[in-house]
Image: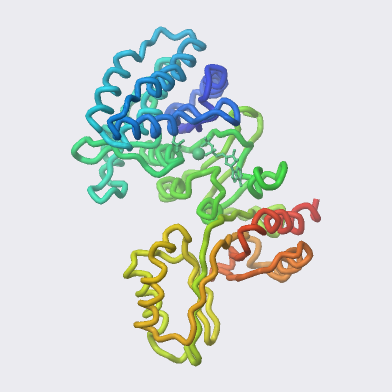
Amino acid sequence: MSKVVKFGGSSLASAEQFEKVGSIIRAEAERRFVVPSAPGKRFSADTKVTDMLYGCYALAEADKDFSKELKAIKARYEEIIKGLKLKLSLDDEFVTIEKNFKEKAGKDYAASRGEYLNGIIMANYLGFEFIDSATVIFFNEDGTFNANKTNDVLSKRLEGLQNAVVPGFYGAYDNGKVKTFSRGGSDITGSIVAKAIHADVYENWTDVSGCLVTDPRIVKNPQKIDIITYRELRELAYMGASVLHEDAIFPVRQEGIPINIRNTNDPGNSGTWIVGSTGQKSKYVITGIAGKKGFCSINIEKDMMNSEVGFGRKVLQAFEESNISFEHLPSGIDTMTVFVHQDEFMDKEQKVVSTIQRLAKPDTIDIESDLALIAVVGRGMRATRGTAARIFSALAHAHINIKMIDQGSSEMNIIIGVANDDFENAIKAIYDIFVETCL
Ligand code: ADP
Ligand code: ASP
Ligand code: MG
């Protein structure tokens, strides 16, 4: 039996946290391959090392003095090394980093040093081999992840090794230039390593006791989800449940490897299991609720739109020409609405509107901004009547106006649009009706 264990930033923010991680790894010999993140926040007002690195490199790129900022980063690692009483010096590493910053090695190189250095410390602390992810995780020239090459090289590299530390978040192009995944990407590295060794389980250790029914920053102490499918989790993660990176399920899903989300500060808690399919019913009709702010809706009206062949294509072409992807597309007989990310749309607003006018000749175009989308997700929803009605009534009771409601064809999710200002209250109201009233 083999497990890959990934530890997030807050699990590795200090020597004390490292010690907890050490006991978790030593408790089971199956925990053979370790994927660490960069040190995160030690307390709520603290700064993650990754953010310190981005800040420091921005100065280097602008040819400004960055010595103070780099020293502060080094101090974060030295505090951990000293606390763990390791005989390890990162002096040479920091000389190289300083030189590479001056030579403008790139923002991704800079950010990746957070995981790279933490990996060196972790390997030294555990007595495991250290593997630089730039030598085993690869990206294509267009910046996408090169899954085939990675799997070939990584599985060969790990074959025959009893243990190893593979830092999260980064890899390299074929020419060796470092490239990172998007923020939170160490979760993806863990999944890639689990696939490469055909692990039995991918354990993802963080600072909460699993995937919770909703964001604990919005609802106090939400219930834990015991078991959830990859598909449900992907929907929730994409819509803002930041406990796991939205792309982290792909490598393990191909192999059917379950993910177990666990809490470094409460290792006795069994956490959440993320699996391919399960006959186990979720405790409530819904499995989870997540959401994001910052959307815009473009409402397009034209009489007899439904009978005009190609109308939808013309509207979407206008977005495509401005390189904007759409998020949702609810439609009626004479209306069609396109939901897009506000920050991507605003600069191109007038261009998109005039292209729609030219291509589709609608009667009216009306734009609404500052909207939030909330996803209510659950495999149990298909078999239950009245889910949408309960959402409507919960929001009506909370005096929240629903701008849009859209049920996915899988009947596994309902997406609701509300004003940004109503976002938190809407999530609380939906949580209350499906969870609190059932406790
Ligand atoms: P790590 O550094 O371990 O990768 P993250 O900060 O990326 O941890 O993810 C854990 C955080 O995700 C939690 O502390 C919590 O604030 C947030 N979060 C958002 N939605 C959820 C959810 N549905 N369940 C659990 N945590 C959530
Ligand atoms: N350290 C990176 C970040 O802060 C990656 C990760 O933590 O997963 O985004
Ligand atoms: Mg994370």
Residue 126 percent location from the top left of the image: 44, 17
Q: Is residue 74 above or below residue 416?
A: above
Ligand 1, seen in the image, is in the quarter at top right
Residue lying at 63% horizontally and 47% vertically, measured from the top left: 215
Up-down: is 329 above or below 91?
A: below
Q: Is residue 404 visible?
A: yes
Q: Residue at x 39, y 82 (%)?
A: 357
The count of marks equals 0
Up/down of 289 relative to 323, above or below: above
Compared across the picture, whether 5 is left or right of 164 comes to right
Residue 263 picture location, percent across and down: 60, 32
Instruction: Please name the residue shown 58% across and 70% down the image.
Output: 406
Residue 21 location in percent, x, y? 53, 23
Left or right of residue 71, residue 282 in this image: right
Please indicate whether residue 178 sits to the left or right of residue 77 in the image.
Answer: left
Q: 261 or 41: nearer the eye? A: 41
Colour mapping used in the image: rainbow
x, y (%) of residue 395?
Answer: 73, 64
Whether residue 428 sits left or right of residue 167 in the image: it is right
